Image: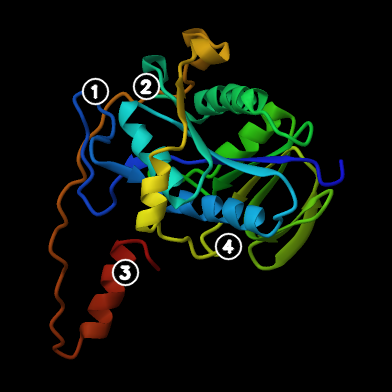
Amino acid sequence: MVNAPLHIITLVKWVPDAQLERRYNAEGRIDRSEGVLSELDEYPLEAALQIKEAAPDREIRVSALTMGPAGASTAVKKALQIGADDAYQLTDDDLIGADIWATSVALKAAVETVTGAAEFDSGEPEYLVLTGMASEEGESGALPAQLAERLGAHVVTYATALDLESERLVVIRSGGTESQRVAVTMPAVVSVTDQVNDPRYPNFKAIMAAKKKPLTRFTLADIGLRREHVEPKVRVLTTAARPPRTAGEIITDEGDAGVKIVEFLAKERLL
């Protein structure tokens, strides 16, 4: 559909602050009480805003969507300050401990709920889901592909440049040793790397404007799911703090330092 309205849904996540020591709570899960918007999720949000700004004659809405406990609202509120038009938070106690499988099930229903509720002035919208290349604490990078499969959408991962044309999205992606140029039609799920842009910082005006933007919260029941639909396939049984680092071995050169280094590397199976 040429120049159809476009709904860009940016997935954002509430993660532990990397500047603080990582801790676990009594249930053996990461303590997120001092969480922040994942830095890697600022890149897809910036990409969405740039797409909107580059097409002033096209009706484009940028929504931020997060899944997490009450504190996760911090992530979408920051997204509103950066420039998202509206925000959504899926929060439910039955999602505590969700693995990637359960997360993709829940987010599939959440995306469909958000797109189904959106109203546009110029017709039926297409939709595009943008994500970071990975979550900062899990770092699997598997969610975009799983989500796209459940949505029946095209998927492109590790995008380093995005260009919205009238009927497709042109993506430059990192293919490891080479770059690839691909094009997809909507609906699509695209993950972007930290090389795609330089995220903006919210100024005072944007922070104040964000207070008037809508933030909608919903539960599993609101999106048509029950606990058995999001039972995780993986469970954490125990957790333990990483042991403190031991002092390194110092080798004094008495004419045989080279031999001692080789012996040490061989003992550590590094040769």
Q: Nearer the viewer, mark 1 or mark 3?
A: 1
Q: Which residue is mark 1?
A: 27
Q: Are marks 3 and 2 in contact (CB under 8 Å)?
A: no
Element type at marker 1?
loop
Q: Residue at x 20, y 40 (%)?
A: 241
Q: Residue at x 42, y 52 (%)?
A: 206
* Mark 1–mark 4 distance (CA, rounded to whole Å): 37 Å
Q: Secondary structure at mark 2?
A: loop
Query: Which numbered mark, 1 or 4, is in the foreground of this view?
Result: 4
**Cα–Cα gap, marks 4 and 3:** 40 Å
Residue 200 visible in the current orientation: yes
Q: Is residue 96 shown above or below 256?
A: above
Circle 1 packing at 10 Å, graded few (<14), some (14-19), many (20+), is few
Measure how far apart labels 2 and 4 are at the Cα level: 32 Å
Residue contact at pointers 2 and 1, CB within 8 angstroms: yes
Mark 4 = which residue? 196
Given the image, on which type of amino acid does mark 1 rest? Glu
In the picture provided, is 165 more to the left or to the right than 264? right
Q: Describe the element under mark 3 as helix, strand or loop.
A: helix
Q: Quick check: 103 above or below 128? A: above
The residues bearing labels 3 and 2 have C-alpha atoms spaced at a distance of 44 Å
Q: What amino acid is at disc 2?
A: Ile
Q: Badge 3 is on which residue? A: 265
Q: Which residue is labeled 2 in the image?
A: 96
The amino acid sitting under disc 3 is: Leu
Q: Say whether disc 3 or disc 2 marks the residue closer to the N-terminus.
A: 2
